[in-house]
Amino acid sequence: MSREKFDFLLSQVAPSLKRRHYTSSIRPNISPAEKLTLTLRFLAAGVSQASLSFSFTISSASVCNIVYETCEAIWSALQPMYVTAPTSKEDWLKISKEFEQLWNFPHCIGAIDGKHVVIQAPPNAGSEYYNYKGTHSIVLLAVCDARYSDGGIFSNCSFGQALEANSLFLPDPSPLPNDTSRHPLPYVIVGDEAFPLKSYLLRPFPGRYLPEDQAIFNYRLSRARRIIENTFGILAARWRIFRNPINAHPNRAEVFTKVAIALHNFLQTSESSTYCPTGFVDVHFINKEWEPKSRRLQTMFMPKDHTGSNISEPLTQAMHQWEHNSSSVVCITTEYGFNIILAFDI
């Protein structure tokens, strides 16, 4: 984070941080700048609150309160600007255009996936936060755009309900680029096999040894979907609080997660050249021709779902036809191997 961005962030949160003061007979009031510095170090370096207490010569109890208070202030300041869903058809169309230009997948308005945020086992929680990997965690399900920005919009269940109700001002169905049939197709979010097939949510064809057109479709969809995995990798690399179990109550761990997402979007939007510079993720240039013998992605074996196939068949055929007229593409994968989950409930 540059000095200019730190000063901007400080100007946004300082009014809220001045409302409370932590004083003692030993040291004067703690300034908003020091509170913000302490909190950013907690999130970015993943150091313990005990270590921060020693470094800043502040009591552990005060550090705990300062971190939580500052996170609340950061979320209040950044959420309206950087963690909001698009509110117009033009905004959705802009995202779709970026997915088409950057990832060669048209009519895509986002990539969805989930992540375990590991926490210390809460007292008397039983198996409430216990997951299949043998750890305790809260679950983050997020949607990102084509440029690694995490909208955080699926952390609120009302977004899924709004999709079902078709009340998000999504663009009207339209033909794919260079599609001679001019058959209108809907705009979709792409996910993996864990998600149900909907008119607004597209997943790969299940099974192995698929026909060539379905294999091509799965490859292109998986390539577009991997942008959300890249986003989680960048998030965990820059905000190392996610590298170890968060030693906090689940409610506070949720606040820390939301603030890290807000800061991620803030820096990715304002200074992406330093926050996620060239070479920060692995880059593979892929020719537009499909090569079945060198397929990079494999699909999990699952029973055939004929209903899902019927729903996605028109889009699959259209994508297959469109593929032959498409240009070269760039595929980016991340080296960070974080586990992805199947459901969400922060």
Image (cartoon, helix red, strand yellow):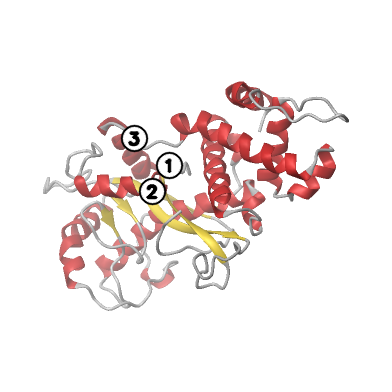
Horizontally, is 39 left or right of 211 in the view?
right
Q: In this rendering, does residue 274 appear at all? A: no
Nearer to us of marks 1 and 2 is: 2
* Residue placed furthest toward the right: 26
Compute the Cα span from label 1 to label 3: 9 Å
Horizontally, is 216 left or right of 6 in the view?
left
Nearer to us of marks 2 and 3 is: 2
Q: Residue 253 or 233: which is nearer the viewer?
A: 253
Horizontally, is 270 left or right of 329 in the view?
right
Q: Amino acid at mark 1?
A: Gly
Q: Quadrant of the N terminus?
A: top right
Q: Residue 318 or 328: which is nearer the viewer?
A: 318
Residue sitting at x 52%, y 28%: 77
**Quadrant of the rendered image containing residue 212:** bottom left
Rendered position, 28 above or below 153: above
Horizontally, is 297 left or right of 302 in the view?
right
| Mark closer to the chain start, 1 or 3 | 3
**Quadrant of the rendered image containing residue 335:** bottom right
The residue that disc 3 covers is 86
Rendered position, 304 above or below 280: below
Mark 1: which secondary structure? loop
Residue 151: numbered disc: 1
Q: Amino acid at mark 3?
A: Pro
Q: Amino acid at mark 2?
A: Phe
Q: Residue 166 or 58: which is nearer the viewer?
A: 58
Mark 1 in CB contact with mark 2 (< 8 angstroms): yes
Rendered position, 172 above or below 212: above
Q: Residue 276 or 210: which is nearer the viewer?
A: 276
Q: Where does the image place residue 145, in percent across and percent down from the top left? A: 41, 43
Residue 154: numbered disc: 2
